[in-house]
Image: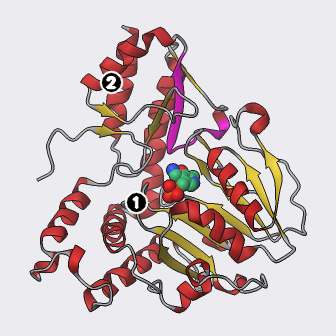
Amino acid sequence: MIAMTHKHNFSAGPCILPQSVFEKAAEAVRDFKGKGLSILEISHRSTDFVEVMENARSLVRRLLDVPASHEVLFLQGGASLGFHIAALNFMKINGKGGYVHTGTWAGKAIEEGRKVGEAVVVASSEDDDFRYIPTDFEVPDDLDYLHITTNNTIRGTQFKSPPRTSVPLIADMSSDIFSKPVDVSKYDLIYAGAQKNLGPAGATLYIVRKDALGGTGRDLPSMLDLRKHIEKDSMYNTPPVFSVYVSMLNLEWLEAQGGVEEMEKRNRAKADLLYSELDANDLFEGTVVVEDRSVMNATFRLKDESLAQRFGRLAEEAGISGIKGHRSVGGYRASMYNALSLESVEVLVGAMKALRE
Ligand code: PMP
């Protein structure tokens, strides 16, 4: 059994997953499907695991309504390898990729793009410490792609809709995938580390338009070549078995809850509750512009730092975990991924109110 004292976990990732998923995952480690073997010791080529992989891929397809033009892959290397894989698979030799710079992770995607070829920053919010999402920018039509980070996990900003562009769109959706519906047809590539709304760290999800691949003129190492992974049905080498299995369990949970439409409603309700307290409570201030606030990661700080110890104590007494802001920005960050309940947000809001008393 999972401990009844489970914390209100606001961690940015790895993060909270549904308790029922933890239970089922624990059971599969002990005995997978009553077969007398652990999920950790079965062959990835066994019928049982091939079924898990296929089920996980179909769940992604169903939940995000992935069109037949796109393939779904569970690979490895995290979103950090995704930065590189995106550029390698989409930037032509002597071509260039465009990037919207909205914070740390977008910056890393640019850095990796530059190792592959010419990476052009088309728009940036660096001028205001990444407190907003740039809009109203022109995308040159000679780019091989435009890369965005849909949700900026560290800064707490989020694209509410993707920028209009005539060039192929690539998105790092690590921290908001499965939190709401997405029109996959707008993207040539979506990638996301599993460890937020998908599952445990280890797997990295890729959703890629098949006919967009193969035109770069590059001869890629097999592990970095998305065509190779498609050809091998996401089983070119040993996949991250446990991470894919638990992702499958989590996606089954998500489907049973009503899918991404239901998640969007719940996530909106949680974010509304937290942000209204933030706006009403004069001890705190949000750190980003209101229109671009993330539904997943709310960033804020105390106006008077000397209250930090008291707030820390109140939060701890309430069983709150993981609200410390990223080390590069400080303050607080409350991550409200799918599995976090409204009740947990009520508890956090309660601690914020208590600080005023
Ligand atoms: N992109 C975003 C938006 C992220 O939030 C993170 C990690 N938190 C990364 C990329 C890096 O992911 P990984 O650790 O899986 O390489």
Q: Is residue 70 above or below residue 354?
A: below
Name the residue beneath numbered marker 2: 315
Query: Could you tell whether 219 is left or right of 48 in the image?
Result: right
Disc on the earlier residue, 2 or 1: 1
Name the residue beneath numbered marker 1: 201
Q: Is residue 159 above or below residue 10?
A: below
The percent coordinates of residue 321 (x first, y second) are 33, 34
Q: Quadrant of residue 352?
A: top left
Q: Is residue 183 above or below residue 321?
A: below
Q: Is residue 175 visible?
A: no
**Which quadrant: the C terminus?**
top left
Q: Which amino acid lies under the numbered mark 1 shown in the image of this protein?
A: Ala
Q: Residues within 10 Å of mark 2 (few under 14, many from 20)?
A: many
Q: Secondary structure at mark 1?
A: loop
The percent coordinates of residue 327 (x first, y second) are 52, 34
The answer to whether the residue bearing label 1 lies less than 8 angstroms from the nearest atom of ligand 1 is yes
Query: Could you tell whether 42 is left or right of 356 in the image?
Result: left
Q: CA distance from mark 2 to mark 1?
A: 27 Å
Numbered range of the magenta stretch: 291-302
The percent coordinates of residue 125 (x first, y second) are 76, 40
Q: Which amino acid lies under the numbered mark 2 shown in the image of this protein?
A: Ala
